[in-house]
Image: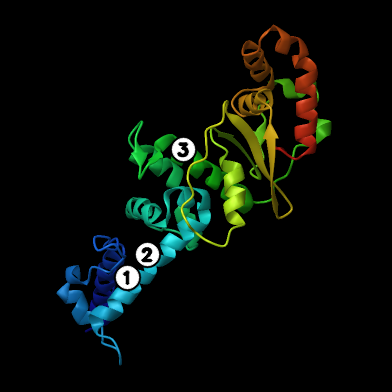
Amino acid sequence: MNRVETLAWLADVQQRFGELIRTPLDRRTGSLRAPVESYSPTLRGEVLPGPEASAVERLAVYHRQYWFRLYTVLQSEYPLTARLLGMWSFNELASHYVTAHAPRSFDLQHVAHELVGFLTGFLPIDSNFDGVARAALLEAAAIDRAFSQVFLAPEPTLLDARAMTSELSRARLKLAPTVALVAESWPLIELRKTILDEANDERRPLPSQHAVPQYAAVFRIDTSLKVAFLEPVAYRLFTLLTEHDLSDALAALEATCDADERAALPGKVQALLRDSVSAGFWAA
């Protein structure tokens, strides 16, 4: 073959090999196996046998290791979600997800970033997956993603407290990338902390639901991840500040308060703004 023919042959082999390893592993026997019976005879002929393995077996090794690595990455990025479902069921969801969102980055960790959006569309409304309610799975995945996003975020330039002047009233604040606001209807943040300290990967039951939703900020200080639980008014304020300029956010917040809350609101807002700026919640 000349150079052009060689490159064309190589591109064709790479494409067919990529299609092969992107095929999910077979789960029907209760274990994860490479479906070697579906391998293209043409591709089999392109692979040389090894001293102890046939061409098909060598392809199967690549196939299995590709998926095992993906499962490991997703389990590491979504430990809470994985433990609520159990690894077998979580890997089933992961197979559907990776089939729809094949890795496209040099960093395999990036394959995990779209899982929350995928689950939102994949899981039917008011459904459950292997006994876990859709709402709980989405909440768990969002919490897992918040921790990962905050940990991986670049170091931001933070809003200086001296910038908190009257000129800021028409500005929209931007949450620092090292901060994420989360809401939970179940005590999932505490459960996540517990399972990360455990040495096993056994399935954990969904805890009892909170009487009322709880709110928190996940944030990073240096290389440490922290959690600060927030009053509902603080969560509403911080969320509104990312959606509206300061004046409109305060007006929207006031409209959600009863008479007693409204009377105390100016002092409360001033303290929340001061403390959140001091804690590094806002980007410049």
Front residue of 29/151: it is 29
Q: Is residue 153 visible?
A: no
Front residue of 155/201: it is 201
Q: Is residue 55 above or below residue 73?
A: below
Residue 32, given in percent of the width and then of the height, sits at: 31, 65
Per the image, the residue denoted by label 1 is 63
Asked whether the beta carbons under mark 1 and mark 2 sit within 8 Å of each other, the answer is yes
Per the image, the residue denoted by label 3 is 136
Q: Is residue 92 above or below residue 233?
A: below
Per the image, the residue denoted by label 2 is 67
Q: Is residue 38 above or below residue 158?
A: below
- Within 10 Å of disc 1 (Cα), the crowding (few <14, some 14-19, many 20+) is many
Q: Residue at x 30, y 90 (%)?
A: 52
- Within 10 Å of disc 3 (Cα), the crowding (few <14, some 14-19, many 20+) is some
Q: Is residue 217 visible?
A: yes
Quarter occupied by the C terminus: top right
* SS state under label 2: helix
The image quadrant that residue 247 belongs to is: top right
- Within 10 Å of disc 2 (Cα), the crowding (few <14, some 14-19, many 20+) is many
Measure the C-alpha gap from mark 1 to mark 2: 7 Å
Q: Residue at x 57, y 28 (%)?
A: 213
Q: Is residue 161 above or below residue 266?
A: below
Q: Residue at x 65, y 25 (%)?
A: 232
Identified by mark 1, the residue type is: His
